[in-house]
Image (cartoon, helix red, strand yellow):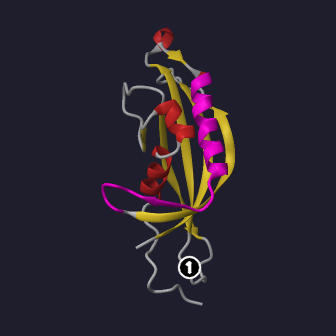
Amino acid sequence: AQPDQSQKFPPDAEIIFREWAVNNTDITDVCSTRIATRLPRNATLPFLTFFSNGGAMLTPRSEAMISSVALQVNAFAGKWGGGSSSQPDYATALQLANGVAEAALKTGTTRVVTPTSATAAVIYSFEVVELPIRVEETETGLGHYQLSLVMNYRGLD
């Protein structure tokens, strides 16, 4: 079988994931829309970062162009500082990380359209590959939890 030539190739997973996240109250109730691929130095906290670890077409010989992409998600909270001046907030960082995991587990087929670029996709499901794990953040002194997800999605016209 060959992919249906009329289907769009899946768009950038990071664009789709961010749009899904900023429209999910399990996440935004904790960090508002402070969600990006990088943690800006001295950013207002709590803050959620993520990046794509790669992926593959779900079934390469399928007619449907469905992508399965691994995402690493990091939740940060606390007060910036160095040495003894930092104040990590592990409770809020864990609350944010758990909010992402819970939202991912609750997500069924969801249409996502970005308002700025009109990039459109359907998220079919998320898999929570790794539940939140605490990361000792010696450089920033922030509370930090990390989790891993797989997002299954395809592009739309």
Q: Secondary structure at mark 1?
A: loop
56 on left or right of 127: left
Say whether residue 154 is magenta.
no
From the top left corner, tell me how far across and down residue 48 is, in percent: 49, 37
User: Residue visible at 65% across and 43% down?
Assistant: 102
User: Residue visible at 55% across and 43% down?
Assistant: 73
Q: Residues within 10 Å of mark 1 (few under 14, many from 20)?
A: some
Q: Which residue is mark 1?
A: 64
- Asked if 17 appears above or below 5 in the picture, the reply is above
141 on left or right of 113: right
Q: How many marks?
A: 1
From the top left corner, tell me how far across and down residue 20 is, in percent: 49, 51
Q: What's the magenta region?
A: 91-118
User: Residue visible at 48% across and 24% down?
Assistant: 139
Nearest to the observer: residue 104 or residue 29: 29
- Asked if 107 appears above or below 79 in the picture, the reply is below
Nearest to the observer: residue 138 or residue 116: 116
Disc 1 marks which amino acid? Answer: Ala
Q: Quadrant of the C terminus?
A: bottom left
Nearest to the observer: residue 130 or residue 63: 63
Say whether residue 117 is magenta.
yes
Nearest to the observer: residue 111 or residue 60: 111
Q: Quadrant of the N terminus?
A: bottom right
Q: Residue 113 is drawn in which quadrant?
A: bottom left
From the top left corner, tell me how far across and down residue 35 is, in percent: 44, 40
Q: Residue 136 is drawn in which quadrant?
A: top right
Q: Residue furthest top?
A: 84
From the top left corner, tell me how far across and down residue 11 is, in percent: 43, 65
